[in-house]
Image: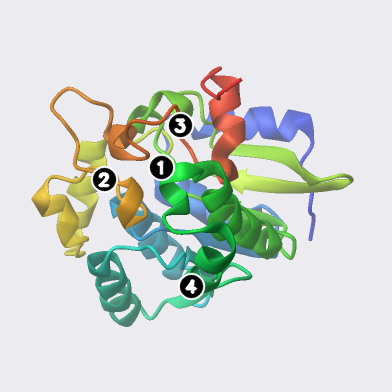
């Protein structure tokens, strides 16, 4: 068992994974990396379905971290239940310290419109941070071509989760395109969130997600009208591209 990879191994892995199938990356992460405590963070979007399908064929009980913010689309929650039953997923719902009603009593109504950063901090960033504290690594469904903030995402990276505490992040589908993702779903007869059929390209919390307009990046419909591309969980990617607010 190991919890850290050397800089040399990280560089070698990232170079070697260019052109590899995501299945090979997931296989390495779960069987060969030496990283024992691994979970998948998923919002049950198309790419996440690919990663979960690949991972559960190797480790059926791998934890799936889902942010139950209280603002998810009903369609997302229904699809989550559908896929959980189909794949036998071990879903762990992550919730904030306060319910939506309790937040409104303290912060006032519609905080997501007035201060999206604080809303994400309470309902996404803090719950995910607490979950990651008990892990050696986590897998995401990052695709480089989905938004400018993700354009340089590596397959494997390590960063300081908190002072003195490193964690490994694995992005198996980083090099895949949207077409690659949907071809995989079709080839493996996997379902998808019905919101895609209505024109949504990237699906988050209902109040802060709209349909994609022609010519926009996939994630342009997230926090539309705000100078924001990512919630705080992924702020390091935005910072790399100089896309965070000053």
Q: Do the residues labelled 2 and 3 touch (CB within 8 Å)?
A: no
Q: Mark 1 points at which residue?
A: 173
Q: Name the residue under label 3.
A: 228
Q: What element carries label 1?
A: loop
Residue 101, labelled with which disc? 4
Which label lies toward us, 2 or 3? 3
Give me the residue at 42% from left, 76% from top.
Answer: 89
Q: Name the residue under label 2.
A: 181
Which label lies toward us, 4 or 1? 4
Instruction: Point out residue 229 in the picture as x, y percentages from the top left corner.
Output: 44, 32
Q: Earlier in the sequence, mark 4 or mark 3?
A: 4
Give me the residue at 62% from left, 62% from top.
Answer: 127
Binning the other alpha carbons within 10 Å of mark 3 as few (below 14), some (14 to 19) or many (20 upward) gives some
Which label lies toward us, 4 or 3? 4
Q: Earlier in the sequence, mark 2 or mark 4?
A: 4
Q: Can the viewer see residue 124 in this picture?
A: yes
Image-quadrant location for residue 210: top left
Instruction: Point out residue 139 in the picture as x, y percentages from the top left corner.
Output: 54, 53
Q: Which of marks 2 and 3 is nearer the N terminus?
A: 2
Q: Earlier in the sequence, mark 4 or mark 1?
A: 4
Q: Do the residues labelled 2 and 1 touch (CB within 8 Å)?
A: yes
């Amino acid at each position: 068992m190991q919890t850290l990879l050397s800089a040399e191994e990280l560089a070698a892995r990232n170079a070697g994974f260019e052109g590899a199938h995501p299945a090979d990356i997931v296989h390495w992460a779960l069987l060969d990396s030496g990283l024992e405590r691994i979970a998948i963070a998923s919002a049950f979007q198309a790419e996440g379905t690919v990663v979960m399908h690949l991972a559960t064929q190797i480790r059926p009980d791998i934890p799936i971290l889902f942010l139950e913010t209280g603002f998810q689309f009903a369609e997302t929650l229904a699809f989550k239940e559908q896929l959980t039953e189909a794949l036998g997923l071990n879903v762990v719902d992550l919730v904030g310290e306060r319910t939506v009603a309790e937040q409104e009593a303290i912060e006032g109504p519609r905080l997501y419109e007035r201060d999206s950063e604080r809303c994400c901090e309470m309902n996404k960033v803090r719950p995910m941070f607490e979950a990651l504290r008990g892990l050696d690594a986590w897998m995401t469904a990052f695709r480089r071509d989905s938004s400018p903030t993700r354009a340089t995402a590596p397959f494997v990276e390590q960063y300081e989760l908190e002072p003195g505490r490193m964690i490994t992040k694995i992005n198996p589908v980083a090099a895949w395109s949207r077409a690659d993702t949907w071809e995989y779903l079709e080839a493996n007869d996997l379902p998808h969130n019905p919101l895609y059929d209505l024109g949504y390209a990237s699906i988050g919390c209902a109040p802060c997600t709209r349909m994609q307009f022609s010519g926009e990046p996939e994630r342009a419909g997230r926090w539309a009208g705000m100078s924001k591309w990512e919630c705080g969980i992924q702020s390091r990617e935005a910072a790399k591209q100089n896309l965070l607010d000053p």
